[in-house]
Image: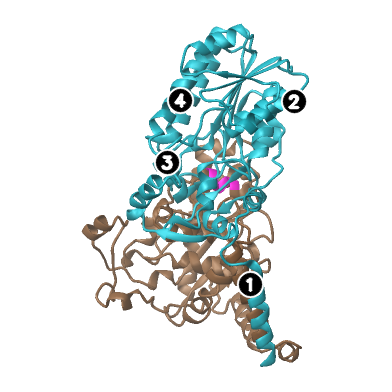
Chain colours: A cyan, B brown
């Protein structure tokens, strides 16, 4: 069943905005509503075409009125985010993520027209520790429940979504647990992190990182909205990069920081407004996380077009990240040394 | 009684292994006369390896196994230890399948897990398919900085059933040391006495995936660091499972970390099939216990047999 009226939250951000644009370009969809607290940037707004922007706060009960008066039948909750607005934005982010979801779900529950709910969640709900299995499947839970930060928000959001699913069994609920996004256009903590000229890592740890190209993320969200595919799905690209390997591929320099000095260094980067890492993201940099995507391919019927490595390379090329040491210089040096060696034969 | 059996002094398989090693020593002159000398080819390999590392141009599997690094950097230093220091002899390598999943279960000993390193080096260098054994390690290993990252890069993963089953069902060769710290940190007087085999998690993993279990008995590793004492207070302080006292450690400081050059034998036994028990065999605790006992007994009996054949700890 193709949805008639779609409401997308978080349209001022990359995923929500581009998703609304895709729905607006789909002639089968009658009406697209985009909700956010601030208007989207102008180029994003232009892309969104016929989609209507509603400046509303999903933490406010008014959202219920929007849903019921517009006869919304499908809600895409894409505003749960890991990227705080500024150095002090964490509390606001948590409010937005958790309270916003509660209000939105309450509004959906009240409206009998709502038939489908798609939630953008994260694989951070699995936590990240040394005691975890190497690869997470959908039925696993975190070893230590995250005590703060984005991961905890996401766990709570999923809890509310499950509760909603119990109270409204007639609504198809799709929860998508995304790995970290990467791509030439999207702006996340990780894309800023890898763009630093010298990338700090935790000494003695090398995380396994699984990434998803932002275009794949959009395609998955779109497919979940246009088709009836209820359930919980891990979404991530094939393959894994080690953090050190990713830094090398981006041509950056790796700066290992002893774990004792990590809070200080993290604080510096936060106050310098370079990268804002929360404690759970710091843990991610220690251990990393890989999810199993068999269910996504078999049941959901989607295979990401980019592997982790290809997505990362696309990001590196798209951002025009120039390696500190030119690969051609290295190859020339290699040829030079071999030429000298050949003379001694 | 097992002691009443006739034990051949010259095991034909072992003799054959000895002879084959002598053959390998003969240099191959054809290599020397080729266009590019050997050292130059090695230099080219080294440079291309360095270029790959700088560019990050290598593949990692989902467990973090870095084959390029393992084969070029981590494995080669083990060669002198394996060939010259411990003079390891492997027996029954043909029991390890050429491809497909299999679970190697071995006895653990020696204060430091050199037995695990030697077994995996032995399979990677002497097995015809040169397979990489993926070992399951304690979470202490993965919690420790540097060591944890290194363990993942060399193909090890956490000892838990999801990881074991994932590796086995994707056709990997998995190594497990079910005695754990109880085995590796046991006092010297208990040498070659197998400790308890945990809860048999490895057996249920093998049953679920239907792969054969290959019992592996390692003789020689017990004598490398004879542990005559355990300082509990220091162990607690550092968060180690034990703090070993050997005749040379901590008395001679870092020198005490040099292992004694015992002569090693690693024997791989007949594979025990697990695909004959039907669908839900892993849920039958009795079967799991019985299989665990069977594996344990096999290893223990093989250890006794190898020990009676051994005349000298250091000369073999």
Residue found farthest to the front: A42
* Dot 2 or dot 1, earlier in sequence: 2
In the rendered image, residues at marks 4 and 1 fall on the same chain? yes
Q: Quadrant for residue B103, please give it.
A: bottom right
Contact between marks 3 and 1 (CB within 8 A): the answer is no
Q: Output the chain of dot 1.
A: A
Residue A336's spot in the image, x, y percent? Answer: 66, 81
Residue at the spot of label 2 = A25
How many neighbours does mark 1 have within 10 angstroms: few (below 14), some (14-19), or many (20 or more)?
few
Quick one: B310 or A232, which is closer to the camera? Answer: A232
Residue at the spot of label 3 = A280
Q: Output the chain of dot 4.
A: A
Q: Disc 4 to disc 3, how far (Cα)?
A: 18 Å
Q: Disc 3 to disc 2, how far (Cα)?
A: 37 Å
Left or right of A192, for residue B111: left
Q: Disc 3 to disc 1, how far (Cα)?
A: 39 Å
Q: For residue A96, which numbered disc appears in the image? A: 4
Residue at the spot of label 1 = A329
Residue B94's spot in the image, x, y percent? Answer: 65, 66
Considering the numbered disc 4 on the image, is that residue within a helix, a strand or a loop?
A: helix
* Dot 4 or dot 2, earlier in sequence: 2
Contact between marks 4 and 1 (CB within 8 A): the answer is no
Q: Bounds of the magenta span?
A: B162-166
């Amino acid at each position: 069943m193709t949805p008639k009226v779609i409401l997308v939250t978080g349209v001022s951000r990359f995923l929500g905005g581009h998703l609304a644009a895709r729905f607006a370009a789909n002639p089968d969809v009658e009406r697209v509503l985009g909700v956010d607290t601030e208007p989207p940037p102008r180029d994003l707004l232009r892309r969104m075409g016929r989609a209507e922007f509603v400046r509303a706060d999903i933490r406010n009960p008014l959202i219920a009125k929007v849903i019921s008066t517009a006869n919304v039948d499908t809600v895409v909750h894409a505003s749960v985010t890991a990227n705080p607005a500024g150095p002090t934005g964490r509390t606001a982010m948590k409010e937005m993520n958790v309270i916003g979801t509660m209000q939105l779900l309450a509004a959906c529950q009240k409206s009998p027209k709502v038939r489908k709910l798609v939630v953008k969640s994260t694989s951070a709900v699995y936590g990240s520790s040394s005691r975890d299995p190497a690869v997470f499947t959908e039925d696993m839970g975190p070893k230590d429940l995250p005590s703060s930060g984005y991961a905890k928000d996401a766990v709570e959001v999923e809890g509310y979504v499950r509760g909603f699913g119990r109270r409204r069994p007639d609504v198809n609920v799709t929860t998508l647990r995304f790995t970290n996004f990467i791509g030439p256009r999207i702006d996340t903590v990780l894309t800023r992190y890898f763009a630093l000229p010298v990338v700090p890592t935790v000494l003695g740890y090398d995380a396994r990182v699984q990434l998803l190209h932002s275009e794949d993320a959009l395609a998955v969200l779109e497919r979940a909205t246009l088709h009836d595919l209820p359930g919980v799905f891990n979404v991530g690209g094939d393959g894994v990069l080690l953090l050190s390997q990713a830094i090398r591929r981006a041509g950056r320099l790796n700066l290992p920081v002893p774990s004792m000095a990590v809070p200080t260094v993290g604080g510096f980067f936060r106050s310098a407004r370079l990268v804002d890492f929360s404690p759970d993201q710091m843990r991610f940099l220690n251990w990393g996380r890989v999810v199993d995507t068999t269910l996504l391919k078999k049941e959901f019927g989607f295979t990401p077009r980019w592997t982790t490595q290809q997505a990362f390379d696309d990001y590196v090329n798209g951002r025009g990240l120039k390696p500190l040491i030119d690969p051609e210089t290295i190859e020339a040096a290699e040829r030079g040394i071999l030429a000298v060696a050949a003379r001694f034969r | 009684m097992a002691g009443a059996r006739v034990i051949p002094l010259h095991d034909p398989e072992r003799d054959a292994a000895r002879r084959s090693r002598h053959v390998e020593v003969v240099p191959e002159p054809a290599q020397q006369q080729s266009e590019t000398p050997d050292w130059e080819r090695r230099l080219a390999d080294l440079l291309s390896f360095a270029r790959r590392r700088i560019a990050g141009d290598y593949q990692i599997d989902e467990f973090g196994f870095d084959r390029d690094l393992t084969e070029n950097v981590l494995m080669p230093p083990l060669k002198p230890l394996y060939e010259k220091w411990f003079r390891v002899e492997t027996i029954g390598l043909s029991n390890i399948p050429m491809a497909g999943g299999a679970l190697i279960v071995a006895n653990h000993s020696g204060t430091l897990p050199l037995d695990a390193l030697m077994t995996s080096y032995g399979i990677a260098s002497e097995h015809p398919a040169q397979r990489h054994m993926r070992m399951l390690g304690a979470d202490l290993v993965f919690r420790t900085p540097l060591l944890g990252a290194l363990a993942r890069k060399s193909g090890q993963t956490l000892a838990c059933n999801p990881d074991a089953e994932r590796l086995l069902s994707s056709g990997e060769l998995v190594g497990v040391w079910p005695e754990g710290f109880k085995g590796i940190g046991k006092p010297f007087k208990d040498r070659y006495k197998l400790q308890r085999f945990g809860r048999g998690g490895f057996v249920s993993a093998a049953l679920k995936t239907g792969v054969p279990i290959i019992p592996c008995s390692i003789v020689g590793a017990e004598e490398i660091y004879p542990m005559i004492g355990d300082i509990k207070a220091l162990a607690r302080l550092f968060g180690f499972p034990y703090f070993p006292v050997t005749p040379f450690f901590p008395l001679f400081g870092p020198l005490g970390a040099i292992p004694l050059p015992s002569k090693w034998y690693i024997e791989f036994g007949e594979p025990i099939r697990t695909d004959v028990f039907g669908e839900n065999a892993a849920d039958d605790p009795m079967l799991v216990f019985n299989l665990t006992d069977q594996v344990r007994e096999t290893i223990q009996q093989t250890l006794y047999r190898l020990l009676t054949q051994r005349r000298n700890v250091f000369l073999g």
